[in-house]
Image (tube, rainbow, N blue to C red):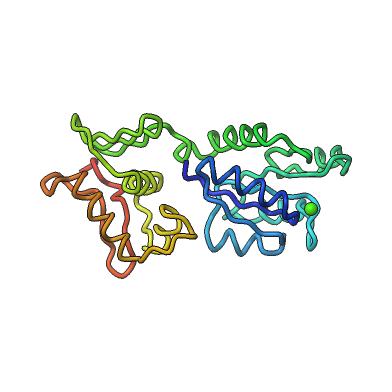
Amino acid sequence: MTASILIVEDEESIQLLLTYNLESEGYKVRVTASGEDVAALLDEEPADLVLLDWMLPDISGIEVCRAMRARPKTRNVPVIMLTARGEESERVRGLATGADDYVVKPFSVPELMARIRSILRRSNPEAMKDVLAMGDLSLDRVTRRVMRGPRSVNLSPTEFRLLEYFLTSPGRVYSRTQLLDNVWGRDSDIDERTVDVHVGRLRKAISRGKEPDPIRTVRGMGYSFDERFGMK
Ligand code: CA
């Protein structure tokens, strides 16, 4: 799963709890304690889901949710509200009309994870699919198997993640930095040239230098998975 989640929460212990659990399920996670920052963060990079605390130090979660719903760009981004017990959960029901769901703190982590999965499955089936396929290429997230037509493709774990990442958004151009952040992780101290090396290996494994290559090099930008692959 490469869905990306924005956590808007000011309590550090909850930030850590959520980040840890979401990252170990494979989500890409960003965290802010400020409701004011949400619009800018979503402009910078879209999220597939927002976990939104109701009581924030600057503006309330409800206001953040309203503001998100008022902008075409973020109108359809699913929101789960987090609210403290007794913190007017009835009002949350009534007011948080823009939210897709809400949970009361202290919440059960497995339950929250299940709700996140179920919302994402509805809103972003691509990010949650077991099998990603384009043209004669398919990647199975469950069996970790990659096939090109009848041929099985052997990939290293890194190349598998790279291909998985490309296949979740065909056509989208990723810079080397974005690929580093999303495939290797933000904390990796890997050189951008490493990305080129792995893209090269991935290409070789998929195409063996003779079959059509679905990965495009976009000069001065980065790489992209050809959204017309298999359609030509
Ligand atoms: Ca709070």
Q: Is residue 128 above or below residue 178?
A: above
What residue is drawn where x is 38% and y is 32%?
131
Position of 192 with respect to 76 (left or right) is left
In this orientation, does residue 76 appear?
no
Q: Position of residue 17 (x, y in %)?
A: 67, 46
What residue is drawn where x is 82% and y is 39%?
94
In this orientation, does residue 137 appear?
yes
What residue is drawn where x is 31% and y is 58%?
223
Residue 134 lies in quadrant: top left
Q: How many marks?
A: 0
Most distant residue in the left direction:
210
Residue 41 lies in quadrant: bottom right
Position of 179 with respect to 149 (left or right) is right
Residue 193 lies in quadrant: bottom left
Q: Is residue 137 above or below residue 169?
A: above
What residue is drawn where x is 38% and y is 59%?
174
Most distant residue in the bottom direction:
220
Position of 18 with respect to 163 (left or right) is right
Front residue (pair 212, 31): 31
Q: Position of residue 28 (x, y in %)?
A: 52, 50
